[in-house]
Each structure stands twice: as C-alpha cells, then as structure tokens.
C-alpha cells in the first residue's frame, strides 16, 4: 500500500558567516600602508518554496537535514568574502511549518513560488580595516563569522481543494469522486477503503473546473483520535465548500445520525468548519429503499444547506450536484 505522507520532521541550518581578514597594505612606493582586511561573506539562508507539482512530503522522509552554504572569508585589499548561496527547498502548496520544539507557527506556503524563510544565515565577521581609527591605525583584530540559525521543523500538508467530500465510512465518497473527476481512488464494499486523501479535477464545462478531495471516513470521536479520520481532518480546512455524503440505505434516522456525527466532529476540530458552506448529498438512491428514505430525510435533516439525492454508482443526480457546486463556488468568489 502506498502511504500518503502528509507530515514530516526536518532540520534546517543556515550557512555560517565567513571570517573577517587581518591584512595590511604592502605596495611598492606606498608608505605607511594601513589595514585592509575585508569582511567575511554572509551565510546562506534556508528558504521553503511552494511547488504545485509536488503532492506529498515523502521526499522529507528520505532526506532530513538541509544546510545552506557558508560565506567565504574576507581577503586583503578590503575584499569582502562571497556570500553563501541560499538553499531553496521545494514543498507542496498547502504546507504548514511549525517549530518542532514548541509547535509555534512559523508560516504557511500556500501559493506556487511563495517563499518562507526558515533559517537565516550567519553574519560575516568584520575585517581589521573596520577597526582602524585615528588613534588605532594598525589594528590586528578581526571577527569570526557567526553561525547560521538551526532548528527542527515539523511540516504538515493541508490539501488545497475547492470542494471537500466528507462522510462516514462506506458512504460512497470515493465512488463519487471517481464519478465526477479524473481521480481513481480505491473503492470496495467495506469500511475504511480510503486510507489517504485523493484530489481530482472536476470539469464542469469547457471553461469551468474545480478541484475536489475525498477525506477518509470519519467516525464518532475522530477529532479525539478515533479511527482513521482524525489525522486527515485538517485537509478539510482549506476547502471552500463541503459535500456531506450520507448513506440512505438503512433508515432515515440512521442517515440523520450520520450527518450529525460528521457535523459534530468538524465542529470539535475547528468551530469555523461547521459553519462553512456545504451540500448534503443523500447517496445510493439507485436502491429503492434509499430512494424512499430520501423523501423523509430531506425534511428531517438538521441542515441549513441544499439537500440533493444522488447515486454515485449509477450517476443519477451527480451532474446536477456538480453544477450546484460550481454555482456555489462562483458565488463565494
């Protein structure tokens, strides 16, 4: 099984600054040559850069340490050492960066080419030319370059999707994503088939499209760590619209319970999520019992949002759902 690497821990180290130089001018026919030692170069920075072509943090499990170049030492004739090259480390768009020691938020890399400085290079030391004064005309002092900043970071990936498809296990989330997009998540007739989030491009027409993601099934207590969904709840945070997929086969009461459980888990994880725009999709209406339950469910569901009937297997109602989501996304802009 391929794992979805959405967390990583790395160490970043800025380059050390170059040392200052101690030098005195020695030229033919230039009497009383003074100090001319140059400064050391600045150490390179470590910068995280967003790349939309990267989908996971798997590369950061293979390489953990990242260090920028050191600055070069100063030289005579007041020549400053060359600064160390900064190290640009590409990360997926949607990466949240925290200090591993105290979980303090350092920043987020959301858009392509967005840069986030995570480790500054050390300052170069001053050469002896900097210490010359009217009373101290031949200083032999210089400074050592300063070490670059170093620290452990935790990286967390939050998927960037316009629409997040959520629901309890075996509700039909992955089947729906396969039906409406180019994604091909695994589908099977048992719970927890989806073990990692999937992204898919949904084409509304020749000019409109949006990105949808299905999130592994949530169960009651997921926000406290139960089941598989607890570590994937954060992937819902960036979705502008949520689709609550509900299994209508068993009973109306059970369908209402499923919706209430998922809604409550979102609220426990982040109070803002429960109030986000959404659509309730009653699924599996290709089965007569589910079609019958939908009529009552539509009235009883405790939601101030559109409630639609679909069959992710047969495709019934799915095209109407896609058009509805496209309109809601346009209104949200």
Image: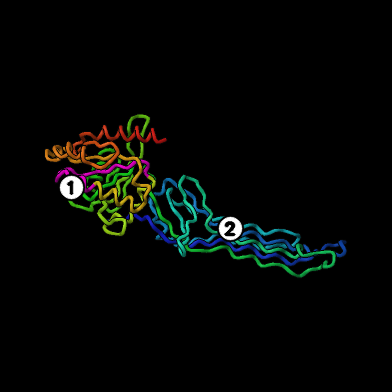
Please state the horizontal and vertical placement of residue 9, each as a whole percent of the image. Answer: 43, 61
Write the residue at 86% across / 61% down: 30
What residue is shown with label 2? 44
Please state the horizontal and vertical placement of residue 174, each as a whole percent of the image. Answer: 25, 45
Magenta extent: 239-258
* Quadrant of the snapshot with the C terminus: top left
- Specify whether 87 is left or right of 298: right
Residue located farthest toward the bottom when viewing the structure as drawn: 140
Residue nearest the observer in this picture, 91 or 111: 111
- Specify whether 145 is left or right of 242: right
Is the Cβ of the residue at disc 1 closer than 8 Å to that at disc 2? no
Q: Which mark is residue 155?
A: none
- Specify whether 104 is left or right of 327: right
Q: Secondary structure at mark 2?
A: loop
Q: Earlier in the sequence, mark 1 or mark 2?
A: 2
What residue is shown with label 1? 254
């Amino acid at each position: 099984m391929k794992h979805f690497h959405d967390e990583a821990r790395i160490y970043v180290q800025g380059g050390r600054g170059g040392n200052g130089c101690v030098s005195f001018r020695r030229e033919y026919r230039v009497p009383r040559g003074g100090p001319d030692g140059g400064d050391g170069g600045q150490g390179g920075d470590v910068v995280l850069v967003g790349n939309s072509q990267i989908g996971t943090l798997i590369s950061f499990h293979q390489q953990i340490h990242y260090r920028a170049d050191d600055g070069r030492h100063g030289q005579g004739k007041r020549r400053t050492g060359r600064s160390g090259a900064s190290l640009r480390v590409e990360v997926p768009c949607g990466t949240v960066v925290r200090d591993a020691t105290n979980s303090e938020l350092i920043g987020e890399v959301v858009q392509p080419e967005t840069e986030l400085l995570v480790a500054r290079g050390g300052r170069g030391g001053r050469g002896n030319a900097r210490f010359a004064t009217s009373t101290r005309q031949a200083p032999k002092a210089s400074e050592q370059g300063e070490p670059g900043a170093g620290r452990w970071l935790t990286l967390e990936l939050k998927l960037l999707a316009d629409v997040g498809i959520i629901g309890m296990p075996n509700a039909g989330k992955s089947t729906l994503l396969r039906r409406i997009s180019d994604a091909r998540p695994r589908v099977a007739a048992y719970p927890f088939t989806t073990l990692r989030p999937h992204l898919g491009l949904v084409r509304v027409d020749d000019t409109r499209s949006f990105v949808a993601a299905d999130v592994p099934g949530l169960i009651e207590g997921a926000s406290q760590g139960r089941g598989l969904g607890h570590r994937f709840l954060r992937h819902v945070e960036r979705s502008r619209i949520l689709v609550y997929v509900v299994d209508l086969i068993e009973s109306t009461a059970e369908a209402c319970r499923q919706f209430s459980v998922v809604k409550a888990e979102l609220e426990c994880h982040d109070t803002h999520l429960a109030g986000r725009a959404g659509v309730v999709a009653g699924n599996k209406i290709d089965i007569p019992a589910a079609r019958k339950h939908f009529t009552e469910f539509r009235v009883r569901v405790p939601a101030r949002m559109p409630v639609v009937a679909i069959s992710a297997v047969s495709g019934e109602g799915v095209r109407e759902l896609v058009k509805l989501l496209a309109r809601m996304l346009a209104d949200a802009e």
